[in-house]
Image (tube, grey):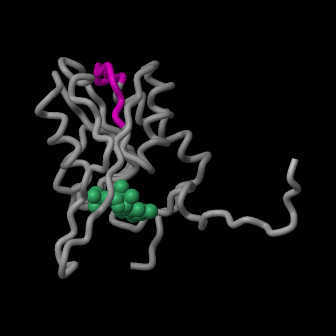
Amino acid sequence: SEIRENLTYPIFGQAIRELAQTIADDGYEPDIILSIARGGVFVAGGLAYALDCKNIHLVNVEFYTGVGSTLEMPVMLAPVPNAIDFSNKKVLIADDVADTGKTLKLVHDFCLDHVAEVRSAVIYEKPQSLVKCEYVWKRTDDWINFPWSVEPPVVRREGQILDA
Ligand code: 5GP
């Protein structure tokens, strides 16, 4: 499909407030927000302020393409969060989007073994996601352009930056 869901930074700010309000209204008060890097870091930071939660953790998840490259599985990269930090804690997993849901499932299953309770919050959830998040701002079937990844990385402008 050529249709794009375009999230801008201003709309992102609005989405975070609305998502946080839904979580608060539901009575969930997380001790820890666990962000999935990199997109989930933006979501976690916003939710942490809006929910007045000062404890943010981070997990790096990347897709590993296996031999033959037909199987695509997400993997947690080192350093993996310390399970002791999560014991008997209420955790909120934060990510930008649940698409296949494989990334969220990996992190969710990791948490299940350690925590008192775990729930997930995403800005977007797609219909095919095998994880159904407790908190979703918007459901879409379209490809999403996120403001932090819609533009390519900056490149150095040769000769324009003077050494101190
Ligand atoms: P999963 O398929 O495991 O749910 O999603 C894994 C990752 O793929 C997401 O965290 C996100 O980085 C990327 N992704 C999935 N769907 C989209 C999309 O519609 N737009 C963008 N920009 N990234 C996506």
The residue nearer to you, when weighing 43 against 82, is: 82
| Region of the chain picked out in magenta, as a range | 24-34
Q: Is residue 28 magenta?
A: yes
Residue 95 picture quarter: top left
Which quadrant of the rendered structure holds the N terminus? bottom left
Q: Residue at x 44, y 79 (%)?
A: 2
Q: Is residue 50 above or below residue 101?
A: above
Q: Is residue 64 left or right of residue 6?
A: left
Q: Is residue 48 above or below residue 94?
A: above
Q: Is residue 11 left or right of residue 163?
A: left
* Residue at image point 31% right, 22% down: 30
Please, which residue is most extreme toward the front here? Answer: 164
Residue at x-position 19% and y-position 21%: 87
Hey, which quadrant is residue 48 in on the image?
top left
**Where is residue 101 drawn, in percent x and y?**
23, 55
Say which of 101 and 66 sits in front.
66
Residue 62: percent from left, percent from top: 32, 58
Q: Position of residue 152 (x, y in %)?
A: 60, 67
- What is the tally of numbered marks visible in this picture? 0
Q: Quadrant of ligand 1?
A: bottom left
Q: Is residue 57 magenta?
A: no
Instruction: Give the percent coordinates (x, y) of residue 61.
Output: 32, 52
At horizontal 56% and vertical 40% (from top left) the residue drawn is 13
Query: What is the quadrant of residue 159 in the picture?
Result: bottom right
| Vertical relation: 126 (above or below) 59 | below
Q: Nearer the viewer, residue 125 or 38?
A: 38
